[in-house]
Image (cartoon, rainbow, N blue to C red):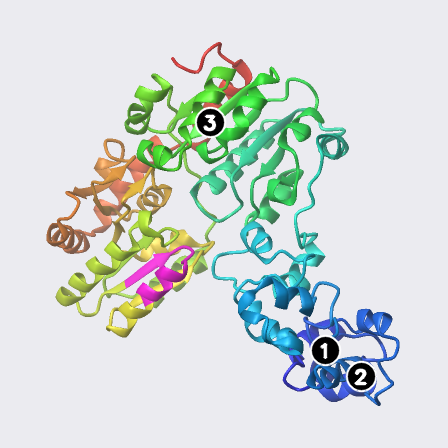
Amino acid sequence: MSMLFDEVFYRKQTRLGLRATEEHFNTAGDAKGFDPTPYFSTSYYKARYPDWQAGGAQTAIEDMVNRMRRGEARQPHPLIDPAYYRETYPDLRSLNADAYFHFVKHGDHEQRSPSADFDAHFYANTYLLPEQPRPFLHYVTIGKALGYLPRPQIRSFDESRAASAAKTQGLKKPILILVHSAQATGVPILARDLALYFKAEGWDPVFFLMQAGPLLPFFEQIGPVFIGAEGWDPIGLRTGMPQMVPALITTAAAAHFGADLAAQGSPCVILIHEMAQYIHAQNLMPSLQDAQRAGATLIGSIPRQAAGLADALGALPTIQPGITLPQTTMQSFRDAQRQFGAAPMFIGAGTGEYRKGLDLFIDAARDITANLPDATFVWLGQLQQAGRIMVQQAQDDGIKLITPGFVSDSLAWYRAADAYLLTSRQDPGPTTVIQAAAVGTRFVGYAADIGLIGVADSLGTFITPGDQAGFVRAALAQAQANTPALRRATRKMVAQHTSFKTYGAAVLQRLTSRPASSAT
């Protein structure tokens, strides 16, 4: 049983500290109903198989292992069904009783579903970061206690309406905010900050998230949250709220809800942050057009972006997003400065996928390193598998590349940098460029399909896409010119043009005034 016993899990479960050993489980823990591993439920097994002691086993899991070694499959957990697991995946059908061990060793990491009652892909896509590979383990050790679902539970219109009515009862000024996810990326962070502004203005935010993510607890602290992937009906949720409650859709990715919400007669505003090319590529335009025809107000974020949408949507009003700076302690600033010291440091940020240009960031890092061997490079944000492979290769090649993931004290990292390297191929912002400039760090970026062109030119330098040599020269020049005076001037420019209060007030005005047409 030693290969299955999880001492860390057992210690947390029993709160016995160093006394929580396998010996303790064998002599006392099994009898008390403790579980030796997240992948085995002692109480479930004993209830389902009351003959578990017939073969002389000391513990329930010992009985299961002994029987499996003899080729007899038993179900170790209410959410793990070895027969289902084996039959669901053709490459596993020869495993017989060993299907359970395959799931523990490999299947959970591969995001395979162990039973009809646990949908691994649903759970991972709904609640986890890309780098969290074991959805079942997360559910047992963390998610279940947080109320996460092991699989979707489709709720009817009436069920959704009733749940919404119950959760919003007593709210004086509810406002419905739709967000595509609670991942720690630009639009969800902006939606959270807008909700905080609305709340400060006396409104009661209610959230509909298409997917969850690490920002979920922050949304839950602000107001009631419904997660669409769990099975809620968004129109039912809206109907359960008082009439004329305004609805704010914070991304074109959720625009398919716009037509139905607008048709109910309540104010509905869709904030479009995506660039036109992306909207067309993701086939989001039909939903935007349907919502517009139904009476929703569509708002662009930057003039250049709105101009690219004009052929399909008409002349859209724009409201340039303000920014709120992440709270960062003085100690974090000191720690970052101490970590990087006087050596040159270049920073970038994003999800690490193709549009964000992590590969271009690494290419630039190679050439910069050839000129500045002591230079360090930092990429903030979540990395997907392809990104992790690229990073590992760069590190193996001697590039000093650090990838701390999403950090809450990002301002300290930006402040320690000599330049922000903007390598996105397509981006309506990014907000991270403005946050870096807010602490004095200027950018060098490719003039690709970037919304900030014409808006943030005074905060850095744009280079023709594909001109890597020119990009590297500009980055080296920026590092050389990184003087205290220039940093102060950069901070001042940002402070003058990025008020979040002004942005929040403009969005709220659109939500509450409800113009006759979104094309102005």
Callout 2 amino acid = Thr
Mark 2 neighbour density, 10 Å: few (under 14) some (14–19) many (20 or more): many
Which residue is tagged 2? 59
Which residue is tagged 1? 36
CA gap between label 1 and label 2 equals: 10 Å
Q: Are marks 1 and 2 in contact (CB under 8 Å)?
A: yes
Please state which of the two labelled residues, at mark 1 or mark 2, is closer to the viewer.
2
Q: Are marks 3 and 2 in contact (CB under 8 Å)?
A: no
Q: Is residue 11 above or below residue 510?
A: below
Highlighted magenta segment, given as a residue range: 377-391
> Quick one: 143 or 234, which is closer to the camera?
234
Q: How many marks?
A: 3
Q: Is residue 4 within the magenta segment?
A: no
Secondary element at image label 1: loop
Q: Residue drawn 33% across and 69% down?
A: 392
Q: Is residue 380 within the magenta segment?
A: yes
Q: Choose the circle earlier in sequence order: 3 or 2.
A: 2
Callout 1 amino acid = Pro
Which residue is tagged 3? 287
CA gap between label 3 and label 2 equals: 57 Å
Q: Choose the circle earlier in sequence order: 1 or 2.
A: 1
> Quick one: 84 or 212, which is closer to the camera?
84
Q: Residue furthest top?
A: 516
Callout 3 amino acid = Ser
| Rendering quarter of residue 186 | top left
Mark 1 neighbour density, 10 Å: few (under 14) some (14–19) many (20 or more): many
Secondary element at image label 3: helix
